[in-house]
Image (spheres, rainbow, N blue to C red):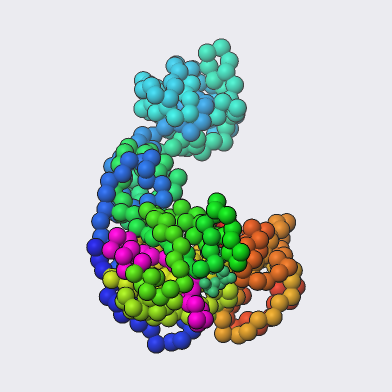
Amino acid sequence: MAQLSDDCFAFGGKLLAVEQAAALIEARVPVLEGEEQVALRDAPGRVLAEDLRAPVALPPFFNSAVDGYAFRHADLAAEGETRLLVVGRLQAGAVGAPVAPGTALRIFTGAPMPAGADTVMMQEDAREEAGAVVLPPGLKRGANCRPAGEDMQEGAVALRAGRRLAAPDIGLAAALGVTRLAVRRRVRVGVFSTGDELAEPGRPLGAAQTYDSNRFTLMALLASLPVEVSDLGILPDDRDATAQALAGAAGTHDLLLTSGGVSTGEADHVKAAIEAGGALVFWRLAVKPGRPAAMGVVRGTPVVGLPGNPVAAVVTFLHLARPLLLRLAGAAPDPLPRFAATADFAYRKKAGRREYVRVALAFGDDLPVARKYPREGAGLLTSLTESDAFAELPEEVTQVAPGDRIRVLPFRAVY
Ligand code: AMP
Ligand code: MG
């Protein structure tokens, strides 16, 4: 396994801009070694390890795109109707005899074009009369036909290495006759929560306890990524126990995620635990919510310490853990989706950091309208469940007024 050096993230700045974090990950994190062959039905979500070249052309042969009549374009009169004798019938899956001058063949979608024919008239545009077909003028040569290789030439690159395979990619591979794909091995990710106050869902809730939600949010966020997830439970607010757990898990995982315990409070031990077992670069991100986020390497395995507040954990997962994981997985960079919207809220913020404001989107004839979730706390889980997107307010912006054009990141599409 490619191991990270303990100081691979070394970075001089204090508050790291989101873009710098992405660039650092791209530059410093090696792709994990190892690939395997999987059947198509096991391939969705996996990362293609090698370019897939088309072993056959697509479509493999010249064929009709519609139900109609195949004929020689040279037989079609420039003006007035043309009457051609219908000499046969050809369905998809059958091979027909050549079409002689002055004749036509009844043909169905997907049937190979008979030798001699170069054009198809749709059945809706023709009429059959006593064994002949009557065709109107004005059709272009080659109309309603699909040339061999129209979709893809034999030997062309169908799918590039690094692609995360989605349903259409699987369909394309099948259309090319491929049954197995070379994919990168899954990234083994271990997920911890930290905090003396956390209770396991399903157990009785003690006084001063709150149920652990982050671990479940994070495992759900990971579900669509090319990973093998281990649920590593809840760690107490204790430096040595945290350090031991991280060191223990580092040997069997490619990436460790924790949440909570990364601020500068006395009960925040994740930073110290990473330092105890490896090296830490305290990546305070210039982002709200989510500023405290620790990043380090323990025994060659990267560790991302996400903040404890549930919304901050999601924001930093998307900006740190996701790109890091995609990089380890050998996936091509996949920026989070963003599109333009109109704000229907007023908002003020500090310059120098990026802010993510939870909004619900209303779609109309114009740009989608972004309505702000009424409350702002980074601990409000309902601010995520009742919203569709983050309004992404850039570093230099200090205020938003109703009617402003803004950028939104539809997080539900990323989950
Ligand atoms: P911390 O960063 O550990 O100080 O946590 C900040 C806030 O997030 C506190 O109110 C914690 O109780 C809460 N929190 C931390 N971890 C979790 C978790 N796994 N699930 C739900 N809330 C959490
Ligand atoms: Mg805590």
Q: Nearer the viewer, residue 101 or 90?
A: 90
Left or right of 324? Residue 135 is: right
**Does residue 56 sit above or below 198 in this rendering?**
above
Residue at 39% across, 55% down: 230
75 is within the stretch colored magenta: no
Q: Quadrant of residue 364?
A: bottom right
Residue at 48% across, 29% down: 109
Q: Nearer the viewer, residue 134 or 378?
A: 378
Q: Nearer the viewer, residue 408 or 5?
A: 5
253 is within the stretch colored magenta: yes
Residue at 65% across, 81% down: 349
* Total count of labels: 0
Q: Is residue 86 visible?
A: yes
Q: Which residues are magenta?
A: 245-268
Left or right of 209? Residue 104 is: left
Q: Nearer the viewer, residue 295 or 250?
A: 250
**Does residue 158 sit above or below 341 in this rendering?**
above
**Does residue 337 sit above or below 73 in this rendering?**
below
Residue at 57% across, 36% down: 138
Residue 360, horizontal then vertical, whole percent = 68, 61
Residue 241, horizontal then vertical, whole percent = 38, 70
Q: Is residue 101 visible?
A: no
Q: Quadrant of residue 331?
A: bottom left
Q: Quadrant of residue 57?
A: top left
Residue 304, horizontal then vertical, whole percent = 42, 70
The quadrant the N terminus occupies is bottom left
